[in-house]
Amino acid sequence: GEFGFSWEAMTALEVLHIQHNKLTETLGPTFGSLTSLTELLAHDNRFTALPKELGFLHNLVLLDLSFNNIELVPPFNHLNSLKHADLRHNRLREVPRAAFGQLTSLEFLDVSFNGIKSFPPGGAWPEDKDPHSL
């Protein structure tokens, strides 16, 4: 299921804290409307999936989705401002290159305590990024 309301009118929203709830629904197709969002704390919920629209939040700097049940990460190609991504304690089996490989601003990535078997599949990280610095 998805959130039962629209995010479209909240274009000025910069910080969203929805952590420590029991949310299971995806954030919905209008979530990409939050173009001013810089901080999303949604840890300690029960999310199993992320909407592809999350990838359109080009001002997002901090993303904490730890302690959920997330199995797949959509491409984050447009998260050009993302510096901190926390996906600890989820159910990830792989970290697709399309999810993080092109994020030149990324300084912190934590995917510990998952069941990752492939990192990254199908190719190397961009040449200008040292994967050991992540």
Image (spheres, grey):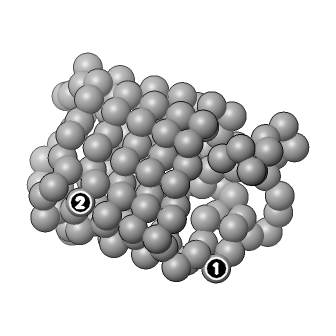
| Residue under the image location 28 percent in, 54 percent down | 43
Gap between marks 2 and 1 measured at Cα: 23 Å
Q: Position of residue 16 (x, y in %)?
A: 23, 36
Q: Which residue is the site of mark 1?
A: 117
In this orientation, does residue 79 appear? Answer: no
41 to the left or right of 76: left
Quadrant for residue 25, please give it.
bottom left
Q: Position of residue 71 (x, y in %)?
A: 44, 73
In the image, residue 2 above or below residue 36: below
| Residue under the image location 63 percent in, 31 percent down | 105
Q: Which residue is the site of mark 2?
A: 44
Q: Secondary structure at mark 2?
A: loop
Q: Report the quarter where the N terminus lies.
A: bottom left
Q: Secondary structure at mark 1?
A: loop
| Residue under the image location 43 percent in, 75 percent down | 91
| Residue under the image location 70 percent in, 49 percent down | 101
In this view, the residue in front, 30 or 80, is: 80
63 to the left or right of 100: left
In the image, residue 119 above or below residue 97: below
In this orientation, does residue 130 appear? Answer: yes
39 to the left or right of 10: right
Amino acid bearing label 1: Lys
Quadrant for residue 127, please give it.
top right
Quadrant for residue 121, please give it.
bottom right
Amino acid bearing label 2: Asp
- The furthest residue to the top: 12
In this view, the residue in front, 16 or 107, is: 107
- Total marks drawn? 2
- The furthest residue to the right: 127
Q: Position of residue 106 (x, y in %)?
A: 60, 37
